[in-house]
């Protein structure tokens, strides 16, 4: 028995060696070194809060404005030219903070996730994320909207950002204040 243990230890010890392979090279040309600056005409977007690159309409960006603004999203070209506003009557812009575009309940459809997650004074116990199919250029109003209501289990928070996992469809909500930062997960299906 002792011999077997010693042989096993010898095999394990000799198989545990530091890899001599160098880490893979990451191309430094993935991102531009000089950000592109575009001006948006005053009055088109006054207080942008969230932005997402359109998957359905290449070359365009979806933008929403901060809380208290109309319940609509705007479509801008990558060059900053305003194209249109799309109304979302079923949504209320209490304090929209961020947006994302990712997969959702129907395979092959891209969804906009519009996060009403702001809570500056920590007065709102409940928050929501509006989810709807990304509109095409011909749409002026979105009427089919899922409202994903949630509450934090540890009290009120003021959140600033969301991420949606393209593979799992889980939603991650990021909160921060002067003392803590946390990430909360809304597991799919919501």
Image (cartoon, rainbow, N blue to C red):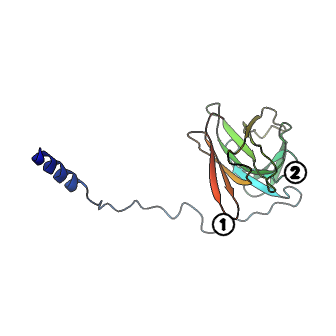
Instruction: Give coordinates of residue 140: x percent, y percent.
Output: 84, 39
The quadrant of the rendering that contains the N terminus is: top left
- Kindly give the residue lying farthest to the bottom in the view shown: 34
Report the front residue among 153 and 166: 153
In the picture, residue 148 is in which quadrant? top right
Decide which of tag 1 and tag 2 comes sooner along the chain. Answer: 1
Q: Please state, as top left, top right, bottom left or bottom right, where the C terminus lies in the image.
A: top right
Q: CA distance from mark 1 to mark 2?
A: 28 Å
Q: Is residue 135 above or below residue 45?
A: above
Q: What residue is at 89 percent from the left and 57 percent from the top? A: 43
Q: Position of residue 112 (x, y in %)?
A: 71, 42
Q: Quadrant of residue 56?
A: top right
Asked which secondary structure carries label 1, the reply is loop
Say which of 136 and 70 sits in front: 70
* Label 2 secondary element: loop
Q: Which residue is mark 2?
A: 69
Of marks 1 and 2, the one in the foreground: 2
Q: Position of residue 88 (x, y in %)?
A: 83, 39
Query: Does residue 3 appear left or right of residue 111 in this picture?
Result: left
Say if 74 sits above or below 167 in the image. below
Residue density around tag 2, few if under 14, some if 14–19, many if 20 or more, within 10 Å: some
Residue 123 is labelled as none
Q: Which residue matches tag 1?
A: 35
Front residue of 131 and 45: 131
Q: Give the side of residue 147 with respect to residue 15, left or right.
A: right
Pointer 1 and pointer 2: residues touching (CB < 8 Å)?
no
């Amino acid at each position: 028995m002792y011999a077997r243990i010693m042989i096993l230890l010898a095999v394990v010890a000799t198989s545990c060696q530091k890899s001599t392979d160098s880490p893979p090279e990451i191309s430094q040309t993935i991102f531009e070194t000089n950000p592109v600056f575009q001006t948006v005409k005053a009055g088109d977007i006054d207080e942008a809060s969230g932005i997402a690159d359109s998957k359905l309409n290449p070359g365009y960006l979806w933008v929403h404005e901060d809380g208290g603004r109309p319940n609509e999203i705007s479509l801008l070209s990558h060059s900053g030219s305003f194209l249109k506003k799309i109304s979302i009557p079923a949504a209320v812009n209490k304090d929209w903070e961020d947006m994302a575009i990712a997969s959702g309940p129907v395979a092959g459809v891209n969804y906009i996730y519009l996060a009403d997650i702001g809570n500056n004074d920590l007065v709102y116990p409940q928050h929501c994320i509006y989810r709807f199919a990304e509109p095409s250029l011909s749409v002026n109003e979105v009427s089919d909207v899922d409202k994903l209501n949630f509450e934090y289990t540890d009290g009120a928070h003021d959140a600033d950002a969301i991420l949606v996992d393209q593979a799992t469809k889980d939603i991650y909500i990021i909160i921060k204040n002067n003392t803590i930062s946390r990430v909360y997960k809304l597991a799919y299906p919501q």
